[in-house]
Amino acid sequence: MLKNYLKLAFKVLLRRKLYTCISIMCIAFTLMILILVTAIFQSALSSEGVERNSDHYLIVEGLMLRYEENGRASRSRNGELGYGFIEKYVLPMNTPETISYFSTASEVAGYSNGARIQSLVKHVDANFWEVFVFDFIEGRPFSRLEHEEARPVAVINERTRDRYFGERENGVIGQSLFFQNISYEVIGVVENIGYPEELAASDIWVPIFATAERNVARNDVGPYVAILMGNNTGDLPAIEEEYATVMGSFQPSDPQSYNKGYSRTETNLERFARRILGRLSIYGFEETERDDVGFMLSLLLIGGILFMALPAINLVNLNTSRILERSREIGVRKSFGASAKTLVGQFLTENIILTAIGGVFGFLFASLSLYFLSHSGMFQISFGYIQIDLPVFFISLGLILFFALLSGFYPAWKMSRLDPVYALRGAAA
């Protein structure tokens, strides 16, 4: 029976080639967008790549200072964490197994053979290399001693190595980079990374203390992000509770200007949701905290359903029109005893085949789009870990089947209700 369904389905689809091509492209484009979005979200939130420890740590990315009187703020200041705040309140914490802090990426200019080269640099501590798991192509990360002694050493990525030094048979370890009025010795080369791992991403990583200004002014607000990592996910509630206690005892270093401080921890998923939604809940001073993760997932679910429903409705209309054109064929088959179940099975098979072909093209288009994004020079960020792997494949397969059923059920049901007498006359019941 299934073999006959398949043969008949292919013959019917080849009968109207233009209609079939339009339907396939409609399905392919819809599924391509859904697969791309699924791949990006899956890569951003999976425990793979450099940020594979993300389910073991909490992130502290901001501090808000306010001067409050009678429950109202007369002035405020916000930004990332300052070294003074980290030194006094974050580093003494007991519940985290590992504490790392590092600056946000900043742009620096260097020169190679007279050519100006723009790169991103991050100032990081030695624990940075324990929190984030880099794959070293050459050399090693800098040690705690090198960080504390402010040695001018640097770890660079492949792109920076190629831009500064080109191809070298003996590698680039020991070579020098000059920027920000300091000559840094290259001690390690890592693979290129970028979005969605922008928390760790940069072109160059150097010790925090090894800067011309010794970027360690003991202020509350500064350029740093802190990572509080436990041994496992179960440690996170205790870390979050201790940090809340720390903030309860926080006293701004300039009490004449500010008398209150707000900051909170967040998981990688919460951070991702906040950035997608453009929230300011990073500081945790809202009277009512929003569930950014739940809100983001709800929007994605609603958006996905609507995005799939529009082309599905279009296909329903096209399929219904196609059924009416085949009314005489349906009438003959019903006159010879074909049941409604048989006819529904046939039409759903046709629709599943049509959707599957569109799914294959959508999958190919999505793969080509990701390859283009990864290798084009249009973006300064790298899409190295965004790929269509097994989880994305099975999610995409589920989307294809759902799409086929969504767009095929009503036309199949309508076809099964055609009265054979009217169908033989070419009219719908």
Image (tube, grey):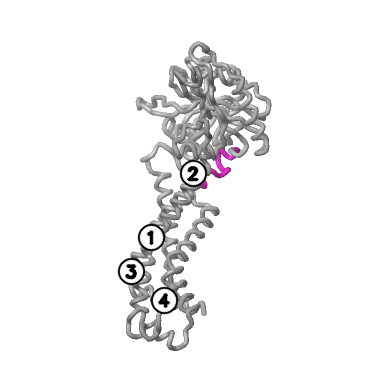
Q: Are marks 1 and 2 in contact (CB under 8 Å)?
A: no
Packing grade of label 1 (10 A; few <14, some 14-19, many >=20) is some
Query: Does 46 appear in magenta?
Result: yes
Residue shown at the point (52%, 12%) measured from the top left: 254
Sequence-earlier tag: 4 or 2? 2
Look at the numbered disc 3 and give the secondary structure of its residue: helix
Q: Which residue is mark 2?
A: 296
Residue position for label 4:
415
Identify the residue position indicated by label 3 in the image: 19
At which x and y percent is residue 199?
51, 33
Instruction: Give the residues drawn in magenta, as a range.
Output: 41-53
Which tag, 3 or 4, sits closer to the chain's start? 3
| Numbered disc 4: secondary structure | helix
The CA distance from mark 3 to mark 4 is: 19 Å
Q: Amino acid at mark 3?
A: Tyr
Instruction: Say whether disc 1 or disc 2 marks the residue closer to the N-terminus.
Output: 2
Picture coordinates of residue 5, whole percent (x, y) = 47, 77
What's the amino acid at mark 2?
Answer: Met
Asked if marks 4 and 2 touch (Cβ < 8 Å), the reply is: no
Residue furthest toward the bottom?
Answer: 336
The amino acid type, in three-letter code, at marker 1 is Pro
CA–CA distance in space, label 2 to label 3: 37 Å
| In this view, the mark in front (2 or 3) | 2
Which residue is label 1 attached to?
311
Q: Quadrant of residue 249?
A: top right
Which residue is rendered at x = 50% and y = 17% of the image? 69
- Is there a contact, CB below 8 Å, between mark 3 and mark 4? no
The residue under the point 46% across, 20% down is 77
Q: Amino acid at mark 4?
A: Met
